[in-house]
Amino acid sequence: MEQRTPEEAERVGIVEAILFVTGNAVEKKEICRAMGITEAELEQTLDALESGYDFDRRGLRLLRFGAHVQLATRPDYAPYVEKLLQPVQKQSLSQAVMETLAVIAYKQPVTKAEIEQIRGVKCDYSVQSLVSKGLIEEVGRKEALGRPILYGTTDTFLRHFCLSSLSELPEIDFSALTAKLSAQQGASQEEKQEEHHEEIPDGL
């Protein structure tokens, strides 16, 4: 028996039920497949669901990030939920990991060597940590000597920072940052050379 395509009035309720039962992020194309509707029809349905949540200031809200959608609680009501559940506080990302993630987000696809060139320090641990958390992933290989891995952000990254797309990232001037790091490294090298000269005994 062929499944009928739901009418427009039903779609909001069906999408809400799907997202509620799954609990996690769901790919839009999977919802379209399950409901037998087009992506354009799904976007209209998501708009209606989202506006309904926002208009009534309900406890749930709709998150859209990349090719995925998910139901989440409204941040305004978080203190009440936390008071009831008393959840264990999540460990935040360290400064080094955040800096590495920022470089990847803005410069992707980018290699580890390119990240280290911008930051001025090694980033093996930070990259591995971000991969394990699902915030970045391998997106290919660069056509260069050794074919180094290229990294990019994931939909989990968008969800983590409540972004719909990378276009919502604030602007940042990496050329100024690179120049500042180069100046700092140059000054550090000069200090080391001065210390070396001072340590040479007289008469040698």
Image (cartoon, rainbow, N blue to C red):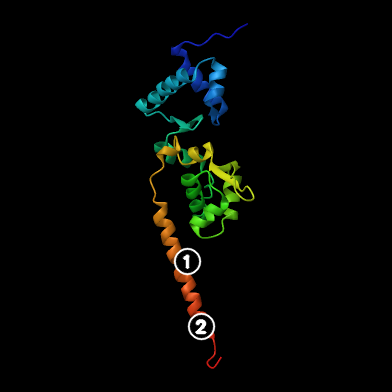
* Relative image position of residue 51 (x, y in whole percent): 38, 25
Residue at the limit of the structure toward the top, as seen here: 1
Q: Is residue 117 visible?
A: yes
The residue at the point 53 percent across, 19 percent down is: 32
The residue at the point 47 percent across, 16 percent down is: 11
* Relative image position of residue 89 (x, y in whole percent): 52, 47
Q: Is residue 19 above or below residue 189?
A: above
* Relative image position of residue 2 (x, y in whole percent): 60, 7
Q: Label 1 sits on what residue type?
A: Gln
Q: Which residue corresponds to mark 1? A: 185
Q: Is residue 134 visible?
A: no
Q: Is residue 24 above or below residue 153?
A: above
Quarter of the figure that contains the N terminus: top right
Callout 2 secondary element: helix
Q: How many marks?
A: 2
Callout 1 secondary element: helix
Mark identifier at residue 90: none
* Relative image position of residue 164 (x, y in whole percent): 44, 34
Q: Which residue corresponds to mark 2? A: 197
